[in-house]
Image (cartoon, coloured by chain):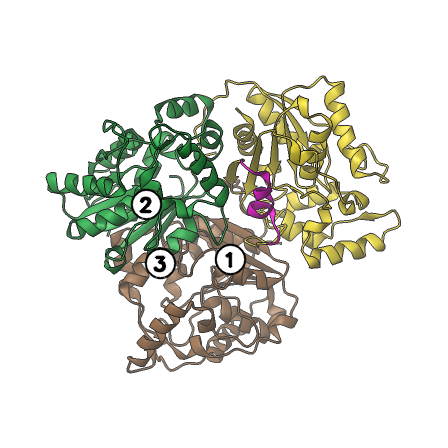
Chain colours: A yellow, B green, C brown
């Protein structure tokens, strides 16, 4: 964090970290440790179809329900609810379920869907076609991320060892939640404060497009929001610069 | 400034720093000290309706006149005239008044207006409506910046203490100069060199829009210009990283 | 490179560095030294109309042929072929000539032309008019880069001494290769992996435009590609931060 003041945090916050597709709770390992080091409480809930919850037959509603239930179970209040990538759509729906437990929503290179959209509606046509073909060819309605796409656009900043380590952890993603149209009318009636963190080397979607992309395309749907940026890509930065990302997330989440 | 060589400056320049709306000369305190440390001469003129000049009934012409008069009074020549935010429109008009005293114009996340425009013409519709309503509801034709707008988009990078300190200094902004259409024909006939500094986390206006925003939307009106960028937002960076900003301003202003 | 892990490279690569217009092989001096320090093999071929090859009457085909011949002569295989600026169009054509010797193409603020385009087709209208006028007024069909354009948009980050040193090295650029329409059908049939490095203060072309510019306008023609970014401009960064640029090029070129 060379551009940022290295102040110690004085306001202990409660973070709930929601990972994205082709990922599991280990995505947040370094960042969670970093936030705890800064004095915060951190929850990293599992959700269906990912990590330890291996049944791939899941719906988007089951996923957001799992996050909300985890918050209820742990008696979490005043949460800074953070979603990465697909996790953005999850925190939108979770906010509908437990709005009173959430202090702020933080989107990290994450989907912000319009009412009635599916995650896949935000895929550029070539990506969408590729994923639809992979979905069709799978036996269990999942999509495995092809290595070249992962290497070039998800972990563009990573060295070979890290690429291999991260790719070996990936398991096929349940397809249905990516293609479900989501009713977000309640979400758009909520007044929870929002932040967006954009890592400027994230090339999962075309940059500078009016039609696609994290920022400003999807971030602009947040209304009034707090923006933070850093160098970084979609999945390397959490592994290689967890303290920097932790500080960005803290800066996004504080009052 | 980790990405930049830490050279000592060898060319003493004269800087005139013009602050923006909801600000006063203290905005530049750290930056002015930084520039002086680098060996430069620095003037930070007061202007009507702001800081010590508390009468809020002012025109845009009175403001640019005050800057020009200050330069004349102090016998300033070869000035690098720097405008922040609203100050961009001020240095455009000041350049018309004392072109021979100015070596270069430097815009820091600042308005560059077209001939015939007002500052408010560059507000996105929702911002414009909000400010028009606030103007109407004021007793003295001023606009007070709402706290949430300040916190989320003017000082997105700041911690709570700094936010509070900076917000407590703010007084209502005279509305008239923001809504005056400015004749800038003379400005557009001048051949003074120009620079633009863009702090990439400045989210006062939507980023990546063709219709609104500091860079590239307004910067592109400068014709041939020198661009510099850094991490930073609209009003935090001058307070927390004054030496970095001083070096950017020096880099923008040198020959 | 403060944002990047300072790891030592473990995979020795072979880089072929192709400079751009108004430049010669000395453009790469620091970067080549940096890559060698990281353990890599580096070739920096001369090409017609530039540097030691002073005859200005050249074609685009002669330039790409010279690069390909240099690779053949040096028995280069598995090359990471890097093009800067105009050099981007050169590596596109070189890839057609010796595809089997190339492991990856890396574009550094470089032209990526569509089939049938000339480099000048990517100039904004005012730049194109200026260069056409300069071409006409030259005795030997060359274009000398005007000092103000160089200073403000090619080396915006440089101090005066460096600007002078770099500008004094510049000789007029052969015009013909910039205006030749290039058949790139073979290039677009190749499946060589590609990377794009974008230095975010490069202001040679308007930023954020849908019609012009390095990234995302021209980079988006690469199909699936690996993106890297850093602070930096068109011609200063190679001189002042060669190790940072070497590491970006390594990151762009590795498997």
Q: Can residue C129 be seen at all in this image of the molecule? A: yes
Q: Residue A87's x, y, as percent? A: 69, 37
**Element under disc 1:** helix
Q: Residues within 10 Å of mark 2 (few under 14, many from 20)?
A: some
Q: Which residue is mark 3?
A: C153
Upstream in the sequence, badge 1 or badge 3? 3
Q: Which residue is mark 1?
A: C215
Structural distance between the alpha carbons of marks 1 and 2: 37 Å
Q: Residue C151's x, y, as percent? A: 30, 58
Tell me how many marks there are: 3
Q: Which mark is residue C13?
A: none
Structural distance between the alpha carbons of marks 3 and 2: 33 Å
**CB of mark 3 within 8 Å of CB of mark 2?**
no
Discs 1/2, front: 2
Q: Residue B174's x, y, as percent? A: 32, 34
Along the line of sight, which residue is nearer the eye, B135 or A113?
B135
**CB of mark 1 within 8 Å of CB of mark 2?**
no
Q: Which residue is mark 2?
A: B180
**Element under disc 2:** loop
Q: Residue A178's x, y, as percent? A: 76, 45
Residues drawn in magenta: A211-224
With C77 as the anchor, is C155 left or right in this view? left
Instruction: Classify the position of the C terminus of chain C by image quarter.
Output: bottom right
């Amino acid at each position: 964090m060379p551009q940022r003041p290295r102040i110690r945090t004085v306001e202990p916050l409660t973070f709930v970290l929601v990972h994205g597709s082709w990922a599991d709770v280990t995505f947040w390992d370094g960042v969670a440790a970093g936030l705890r080091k800064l004095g915060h409480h951190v929850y990293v809930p599992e959700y269906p179809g990912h990590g330890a919850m291996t049944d791939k037959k899941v719906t988007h509603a089951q996923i957001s329900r799992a996050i909300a239930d985890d918050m209820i179970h742990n008696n979490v209040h005043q949460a800074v609810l953070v979603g990465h990538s697909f996790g953005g759509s999850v925190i939108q729906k979770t906010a509908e379920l437990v709005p009173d437990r959430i202090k702020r929503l933080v989107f990290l290179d994450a989907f912000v869907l319009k009412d009635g959209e599916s995650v896949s509606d935000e895929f550029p046509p070539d990506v969408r076609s590729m994923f639809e073909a992979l979905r069709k060819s799978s036996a269990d309605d999942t999509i495995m991320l092809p290595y070249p796409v992962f290497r070039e656009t998800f972990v563009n900043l990573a060295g070979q060892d890290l690429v291999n380590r991260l790719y070996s952890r990936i398991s096929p993603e349940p397809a249905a939640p990516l293609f479900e149209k989501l009713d977000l009318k309640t979400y758009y009636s909520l007044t929870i404060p929002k932040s967006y963190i954009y890592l400027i080397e994230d090339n999962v979607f075309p940059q500078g497009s009016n039609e696609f992309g994290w920022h400003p395309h999807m971030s602009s749907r947040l209304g009034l929001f707090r923006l933070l940026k850093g160098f970084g890509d979609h999945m390397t930065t959490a592994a290689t610069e967890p303290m920097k990302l932790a500080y960005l997330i803290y800066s996004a989440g504080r009052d």
